[in-house]
Every structure is written in structure tokens, then in C-alpha cells.
Image (cartoon, rainbow, N blue to C red):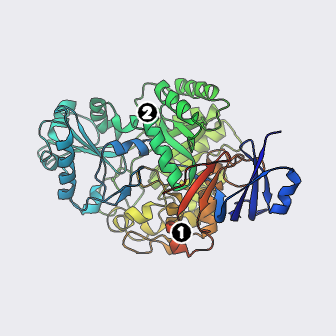
Amino acid sequence: MSPITVFQARQILTMNPRQPQATHVAVREGRILGVGDLARMQAFGDFTLDTRYADQVLMPGLVEGHSHLMAGGLWKFSFVGFHARTSPDGRVWEGCRNFDEVIARLRAADAALTDPKAPLLAWGFDPLFFGTERMTVEHLDQVSTTRPVVILHASQHLMNVNRAALAAAGIDRDTDIEGIARFADGEPSGELQEFAAMFPITRLVGNIFRITGSSPESLRLFGQMARLAGVTTATDLVNDLAEPNHAAMMQVTGEPGFPVRLVPAYLCLDGSLNRTQGAARIRQRQAEAEGNAKLHYGLVKIVADGSIQGFTARVRWPGYHNGAPNGIWILPPAELKAAIRDFHAQGFQLHIHTNGDEATELALDGIEEALAAHPRADHRHTLQHCQMADAAQFRRMATLGVCANLFANHIYYWGEAHLAQTMGPDRAFRMDACATALAHGVPLAIHSDAPITPLAPLFTAWCAVNRLTSSGRVLGEAERIGVPEALWAITQGAAYTLGLDDRIGSIEVGKWADFCVLDESPLAVAPEALKDLRVAGTVIGGVPTEAAA
């Protein structure tokens, strides 16, 4: 019989309501054999008692239900975001607080490039933090007039480029693509909104921002970030499952020390595959990954609209608070419904990006029509972000069996901007309405959308519990949820939306032995201190990972 290891902790928070706490957990063959006290462990016979966590707290490995593997590889490029960020090596990068600081950081990066023709790539920028001024070619031409300069916005739904990039990509005043921002004279300003407008640039630079998540090196960086955050299962919610991506994920998840289980969701990045071919690719990858406990296929990603902070999300009346025109349909409504229907009929679980409430309504229409045509029990289709959903829409989700994975981090990072610019009073107070979702019985997860915001589920839980903006304002007190509910959302709740709640999300017999190690119990500290809990390490499949710094 395989050996048994019993881990001892000061406290074990199981997230199992039938046995909420314990002090010991027995592990055999990477799975949980028993949970309880030391006396209960004696029933298993001989075992090795591991006391390394005797003074610490164990809880289930945290589950990030909406992230992107590029969060690791993006650190190969310049970070120009407003809020400070920590890179995978633990270094803190201060934010750029104005356009001049952005330009200065880019100039330093330009000076470091040895190839005069290589594009300069940067990420994390968001002009919403700088008032009403928008970045243009006039700003980025100060960095270089010869090499393409490309900045991906924090939302990843917009980018800014210089004139050299526009010229190299063939974008000019006559280019007829929705989303190309223009000066009053009709010339492109250098801001490109949504994927169609950005496509000529991504074709020019090789779509580097997406492929940063496909190399083994980048995946290892992502694994390092996940470990530091206490995450043992994470999604990649945009992946075309092409052979190089699949091969890299198979390679790194097969490495004994890789600390995170990966759950990629299929989304064709260039439109070359139709829905039938896409389904065939998913099933092929499922067969190839069979037996790999750290790689799970079967999710489909569908994107309905853009981002609220980029004014490209589709919102209902009364529209954007500052009068900006309504956003962009990434998929036209008829095509969106067709994608929902076809992938649903083939048995896949759908994860549908809907930021604005108009997009949410259309997605629910599509799901309702798909269920009428092809009834399916326990489909667990999930609306991702779903930031502006109201009570009526949450009631409809519950009726249809739809889950919600809400972007709680927006309250902190963009709350003030939503209040003043995008949604205004009242609607900003009900953004990411976790309390309303739970009140109507909607299965709930919350997420970071890393690299949009940092991969840190305990911080995400803090956002849902406290709803504090970066200025310290409480934004929507009525939508606060308790710490237990928030912890559930980053463990069992997220696992449920991935169809993996039978294997992860709680510490109970039969599940994988994935744990997050904390110095203190999140139930014992003040709610305001939840984000400050130190992750001391993780355990995956019963194997402790390297301790966090």
C-alpha cells in the first residue's frame, strides 16, 4: 500500500460545511484520505506525521476562475500601469502616475533595445486614471519615430501605438475598421479599440501579447506567481489550443515541481477555425491530456463585448455617465447566439465575457434559446465579469442554472472612475453585485482576470468583503459579502464554475490534496486585514511547494 502522510496544522479550514475545521489531514497518492484530529488519523495505521505547518493555517488551494497564462510572460515587457505591481521574482514595480512617467519608462526601455527595428512593447496602461486626456501618437512619437511602439491597455481591449506602428501595420485615414480612434481631421490618433482594430498591429508584432503565455518559460513564471498567491488551480480563459500551446502546457504540467493545475478555455484568436473544427480540437486535446491531473480541457470562451473602463462594453439605458457612445459587440448578436447554441449543443461548458448589462441580457437570451433547443442539466455556463447585472438578471441566471464569476477587483482599481465617468451614481454602487447574486441563489465565484489586475485571490476576497476603492471610499455597502462567503467564492465557488468541485475547492476525502498555507486564519483577522494575510506556501497533490518569500 502507498505510504500515508499526515499534515498537522494549528487550524485547517476545510470549506466543507459538514466538517468546517480540523487539525490533521491524511494524504495518500496525492489525494485526501482523512480529515480530523490526530486520534482519528490512527485508524489509517502507519503514517508519517509532517509537522512543518503545526503553527500555521491550512485551507484549500485557492482557485482562480478567470486568469490568463500571459500574466507571467508579460513581465518580459515594460510595465506602465498606474498602480504598483509585483513581478514573479517578487520585485515591486512602482506605477506610472502621469503621461510623462509613462513616456520616461518607455524611453528607458527604448534605449535598452539593441535591435533598431524591434518593436517596443509595454502593458498595463489605462488613461482612465489620468482624467479625460487620451494618449495619442503625439505622446508615443516622443519615445521613437522609427520603431513601432505598442502599449497594451490594462483591460487588453485597447492599445496605443505610435505613427511608426500605424504605418507599418497599414492603418491610415482610409482604413475602415470599427474601433480606430481619430483626430478631428480624420487621421488615426493611435488608440485602437477592441480586437478588430488591434488586429493589424498584433499581426505586425506576431500577437506577442497573447503568445507570451505559450512558452514553457512563461508558464513557469505563471506558476511562480500562482504559488506566491496561494493558487493551486488557475484558468487560461483565452487559448486557441494550438499544438505549440498544448505541447508547452503538457510539458510544464508534467514537471514534478510545477505548482498549479491549468484549466484552459478554447477561444480561436484569429477566426480561422469554425465552431465544428473548434469542438474537434478541444476533444483532441482532452484525449491527449487524459491522465494528466494538472491539465484540464473542456471549457469554451465566448466574448460578447468590451471593457467598461475602455467604454467598449455594451450597456443599457441610460448609457455611459459621461455621454460616451455605447460600446462594441465583439461578436454580432446573431453570431453570439449561434456560438452559444452550437457549443452548448455539443456538450461544452461556456464561459461568456459580458461586462455591460446589455451584453449580459443578450448572453442570457442566447443561453435560454440554446436550452430550449437542446435541454441540458447541470451545464454550469458561466458569465464572466458580468459587472453591471441587476437583480432581475441574477434571478434569470438562477432560473437558467447560470453561474456568475464577478470581477470584484474593479471596485478597488476602477471604482472611483466608474463613479465619476463610466456608470455614475447608483449603477456604480451595484457593480459586481456579489450580495445580490448570492441572495438570488446564483453560484458565485470572484476573480482577478490576471494580468488585468494582480493574481491574488485573498485580495479579491477583500474587495468583495469591503468594497473599498483605491481612495478608501465604500462603493456599494449593500453589496458587501461576509468573509466566509468570499472564501467560498475563491475555493468551492470557483471550482464549481470549472466543473472541478468534485476534485478541488475543499479539504475532504477523495479530493486532491491541494492546500494554501497561511500564517493566520482569514476568519480570525479583521475583514479589513484580509488582503494582508501572508501566503506561506502551497501544497499540490500532497507535495509541499517552495515557501513564499
Mark 1 residue type: Leu
Q: Which mark is residue 530?
A: 1
Q: Is residue 38 above or below residue 274?
A: below
Percent of width and height locating residue 286: 62, 29
The earlier-in-sequence mark between 1 and 2 is 2
At horizontal 43% and vertical 39% (from top left) the residue drawn is: 218
In what element is the residue under mark 2?
loop
The residue that disc 2 covers is 215
Q: Which mark is residue 4?
A: none
The one nearer the camera, 121 or 320, is 121
Q: Residues within 10 Å of mark 1 (few under 14, many from 20)?
A: many
Percent of width and height locating residue 70: 42, 42
At horizontal 85% and vertical 59% (from top left) the residue drawn is: 40
The one nearer the camera, 440 or 538, is 538
Percent of width and height locating residue 305: 42, 46
Q: Is residue 414 above or below residue 174?
A: below
Mark 2 residue type: Ser
The one nearer the camera, 534 or 292, is 534
Percent of width and height locating residue 451: 41, 49
